[in-house]
Amino acid sequence: MGARTELRTLLAKASPLRSGDQLAGLAARTQEERVRAQMELADTALQRFLDEPVVPYESDEVTRLIVDTHDQAAFAPVRGLSVGQFREHLLAYGTGPAELRALAPGITPEMAAAVSKLMGNQDLVLVAKKISVVTRFRNTLGLPGHLAVRLQPNHPTDDPRAIAASTLDGLLMGAGDAVIGINPASDNVASLEHLVRLIDELVTTYGIPTQSCVLGHVTTQIAAIARGVPVDLVFQSIAGTQTANASFGVDLKLLGEARAAALSLKRGTVGDDVMYFETGQGSCLSADAHHGVDQQTLEARAYAVARAFSPLLVNTVVGFIGPEYLADGKQIIRAGLEDHFCGKLLGLPMGCDVCHTNHAAADQDDMDVLLTLLGVAGVNYIMGVPGADDIMLSYQSTSFHDAHYVRQVLGAKPAPEFAAWLERMGISGADGKLRATAGDSALLRHRLLTSSAR
């Protein structure tokens, strides 16, 4: 490296190996070059990340958001540190949850990404474990000792009976406290309304303390709200640059409008965190909107976008984009830990879709490893997909049984309001264990399953 390497080049060269950075021509060519970059990065002052934006302030609204909302008072305790010293500060016994919570508004995404590049997997787990980010809508998510599950009952034709069957299956396995979230096969207002009303009827009929979301484009959701559709959460995929977000058809102004629309419905009972965001390493590169910045740093910048809108849920869909960006199980595991750490450090309620595509050099054993590590690290929520195989999106994720496994291993509980509902419904006992008689639940008499009509 040179006497003073350009910051975005330094960040890219210091990144652990991943195929996306190689594809972009940004990765270190050798392990020696990577270590030299990490050594230089360790000596780099945190202040430099404020002085030298990796994407120009003038041309990128995400950079402007990061710079203009930076909290200098929160940054003050670490202002004089280098990236390496910051790592030691985060790992220190004396740096606990209260300190990290107060520090979050003073940390920029680039700082978080930089320090993560100097950390081993166990470091990423240890620091993330210290941080709890609690959010609320119809239940309370992110409390220490709890692990929530997004129930994901997707279907390739949006068949209401199939969606209802998958939803009830998940509820009987204790999934669904994070959200009952459907990726619609058709993104239009009529389809979204049909699916929202389907889940709303189920939630209302059985008094389920959870929230629903149909993951259409944000403009579709705003239009549905204007029609009086009972939308709980507003969803959108986001990225770390203005041009990448434009490729998704969004900007910060539109996201603000969406949040205002959702808040206007006043559907929350214990809180008003109404936004749900998904991200993933490689999205900027796939949109040709990476500006010469490595994919992990850009992923962290997406968290600045999310942070601006007080979301209930944020998750990295870590292996979904494919092996061009994360080639194998080792890269996916590392990326999942990085994303979770950076999001938590920035004050976000981080979940993870522990997943891979079938053409990546990864399998379910790799996903079990990442799932367990994230559970130990205190991840807010994971996915619950029937059989771990999403038949609409055609990728491999985590199942209802996987979620039950990690709750058992770690002694983690569902959201407290949801846990109480599971017990009232006879699905689980006071000890959190699923009951053998859960199959007798009134849920199985839901009309969509008992009716022959489609």
Image (spheres, grey):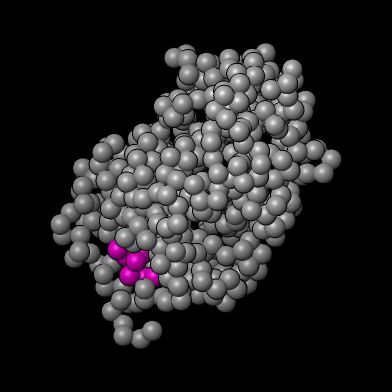
Would residue 53 be counted in the magenta stretch?
no
Q: What span is colored magenta in the figure?
A: 163-169
Image check: 197 left or right of 282? left
| Picture coordinates of residue 433, whole percent (x, y) | 21, 47
**Quarter of the image with the N terminus in it:** top right
**Above or below: residue 173 compared with residue 309:** below
Q: Nearer the viewer, residue 271 or 80?
A: 80
**Above or below: residue 238 compared with residue 46:** below
Residue 370 shows up from this direction: yes
Determine the image quadrant of residue 26: top right
Query: Farthest residue toward the right?
Result: 58
Q: Residue at x 51, y 51 (%)?
A: 323
Dominant SS type (magenta): helix
Residue 306 shows up from this direction: no
Q: Nearer the viewer, residue 426 or 29?
A: 29
| Picture coordinates of residue 327, whole percent (x, y) | 49, 47
**Above or below: residue 454 compared with residue 118:** below
Q: Nearer the viewer, residue 24 or 256?
A: 24
Q: Residue at x 51, y 53 (%)?
A: 322
| Picture coordinates of residue 147, whole percent (x, y) | 37, 42
| Picture coordinates of residue 219, whole percent (x, y) | 66, 64
Would residue 164 be counted in the magenta stretch?
yes
